Image: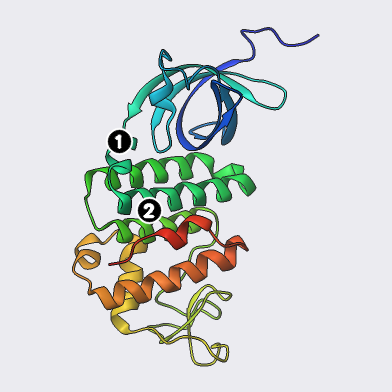
Amino acid sequence: MAPSFAARTYRDDAVVLRTHKLGEADRIITLLTKHHGQVRAVAKGVRRTSSRFGARLEPFMVADLQLISGRSLDIVTQAVAKGAYGGAIAADYGRYTVAAAMTETAEKLTDVDGESGTAQYNLLVGALASLSRSDHAPELILDSYLLRALSTGGWAPSFTDCARCGAAGPHNAFSAPLGGMVCPDCRPPGSPAPAVETVLLLGALLTGNWATADASATVHRREAAGLVAGYLQWHLERVLKSLKHVERT
């Protein structure tokens, strides 16, 4: 016997990763929920001007949702705003492109690793909140988020000891396939040798040392961004479409 309507109903906090149109008035919403991992759901009638909760289901918004489990797609029946970050982020192109890169990363990571869903949810919501408040430069928030999201997903980089053999650092070569900074004995041919300041910045972004990150120079931010992008691409085994639109100062 099929489960009852009540048995199929559940509530959860969720951040909206992506939306696309369905029919004349509906949307399919890709969500990262706090307790149910990544969920794809239909929001009926949200594109109508009379919709009660359409604005709460825009990208980068955080809401308390009531949903009904379906065969292929769940259905959103209620939405109560918890973090209205979308407006402030969408009003600035730089913040918007950063948020798009973060939500695309979260979607890729939780699509293959549902077990870290709660940790990835908390990490993304914190990053979107910080971005909406302009706590730090958008590109620093992005690179910090990417490093932490990869770490949460099981790919924590090392910026001190050798990522391959564990030899005490600091070291002066970086290898994405090996997991971070590597010693001279483990260094693959052609590995980049980032500036000392860049390595310190990467470590600060990973650990949340914002005093060091905020004081970093533009040249080191750009070098760090390139290494983070390469590390992300290697471990996700794909290129993030939204990352190329991010503005770098």
Mark 1, other Cα within 10 Å: few <14 / some 14–19 / many ≥20: some
Residue 129 percent coordinates (x, y): 30, 41
Residue underneath mark 1: 87
Residue 186: quadrant of the picture: bottom right
Using the image, determine if residue 9 lies above or below residue 115.
Answer: above
Residue underneath mark 2: 98
Residue 82 percent coordinates (x, y): 34, 26
The residue at 22%/67% (across/down) is 212
Specify the quadrant that holds the C terminus. bottom left
The residue at 72%/23% (across/down) is 71
Using the image, determine if residue 185 lies above or below residue 179.
Answer: below
Q: Secondary structure at mark 1?
A: helix
Q: CA distance from mark 2 to mark 1?
A: 14 Å
The colouring scheme, among rainbow, by chain, secondary structure or one colour, is rainbow
Residue 221 is left or right of residue 31, and the answer is left
The one nearer the camera, 80 or 211, is 80
Specify the quadrant that holds the N terminus. top right
The disc labelled 1 sits on which kind of residue? Gly
Looking at the image, tell me whether mark 2 or mark 1 is earlier in sequence order: 1
Residue 29: quadrant of the picture: top right
The residue at 22%/49% (across/down) is 134
Tag 2 and tag 1, C-beta contact below 8 Å: no
The disc labelled 2 sits on which kind of residue? Val
Residue 170 is left or right of residue 180, and the answer is left
